[in-house]
Amino acid sequence: MKLTEHAPIPTPWAAAEALGASAAELAAFHDEPPQMASGAVGKTGYLRLGFERRGERTVLAELDRRTPFMAQRALYPDEAMPDLAWVFMITTSGCVLQGDRLALEIELAPGARAHVTTQSATKVHSMDANYAVQTQVVSLADGAYLELMPEPLIPHRRARFLSDTRIAIAPTATLLYGEIVQPGRKHHHPDEVFGATALSLATSAARPGGELLFAEKLLVDPVRRPVRQTGVMGPFDVLANVILLTTKDAADRVHARVAADVDLANGVAFGACHLPNDAGLVFKVLGRETLPVKAKVREFWAIAREEIAGTALPPPYFWR
């Protein structure tokens, strides 16, 4: 079965422009940069990845892009899941800049299985005008399996960034989506830690027919809402938010194997809970440093892989 036919969208990044214009948290930042105007060519990145099952493999059947977004060809490095297509997303600008309007679309046809990640951390540079917005639309058909595991997001001091992720997932599909958010370049300058002016990360999921499964939004506004208070970040610096959308039976099996703990000696706190509407699980990790947080995310990823795909994770690559 082919990918879902859809009407072409001439400017898919226009959704990012409209979202930024209507977001209350960005209302104070509508001035234009003195350099390239917001949404100019080179600042309207677009990447569409369409995966199909063909024979014994999943292939990257559709690739559309607009600079600064690019993608490598599909690779098959996982011996335990030889049909799993790995794709690395690349940005030629190396970072997110003020005035950027970015759009990502990922679609998996029935039975397709893919792992999508980034070539490095996403760095959101300091801003003295306007803001940056990214929209992400992820669609999974029946029996599809996607691991969307980008490297950490690093908002620099005075960054203004909004991300909106919307997921459409069939009841028999599985999505593992992980976000790791660092506080800034904490070892670069003391004012970098939670120095972003505004950071807004929203995620929602629905069935293909439109039935809403869940919606959540993380808003970091350090001036008006202190981040260090108890119940927010407290003594921790790094946050991981991992969403597992899958069948109820699979979610129950994963949840039964996931521990919860506040380990102050090793600087991590973690745990999982069920999402509403039997949508799956959310696994959250807090840490003082990034590596222990990534290790806990990998543990959860390994459990999910074993319970849902029936295979183990490959050894981590030396650069990860």
Image (cartoon, rainbow, N blue to C red):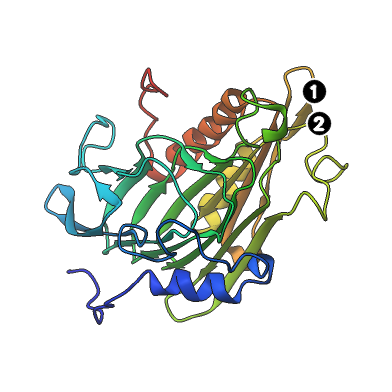
Image point 48% across, 49% down: which residue?
Answer: 177
Do the CB atoms of the residues marked 1 and 2 lie less than 8 Å apart? yes
- Disc 1 versus disc 2: nearer the observer: 2
Where residue 178 appears, as percent x and y from the top left, is 51, 45
Of residues 99 and 216, the one drawn nearer to the viewer in this rendering: 99
Where disc 1 sits, the SS reads loop
Mark with earlier residue (1, 2) = 2
Residue that sits furthest to the front in the current view: 34
Q: Which residue is mark 1?
A: 264
The quarter holding residue 257 reads top right
Tell me the number on the disc at residue 235. Answer: 2
Q: Quadrant of the N terminus?
A: bottom left
Residue that sits furthest to the left in the current view: 55
Q: Quadrant of the C terminus?
A: top left
The quarter holding residue 170 reads bottom left
Of residues 174 and 116, the one drawn nearer to the viewer in this rendering: 116
Horizontally, residue 211 falls left or right of residue 113, namely right
- Which amino acid does the dot numbered 1 rest on? Leu
Horizontally, residue 275 falls left or right of residue 76, namely right
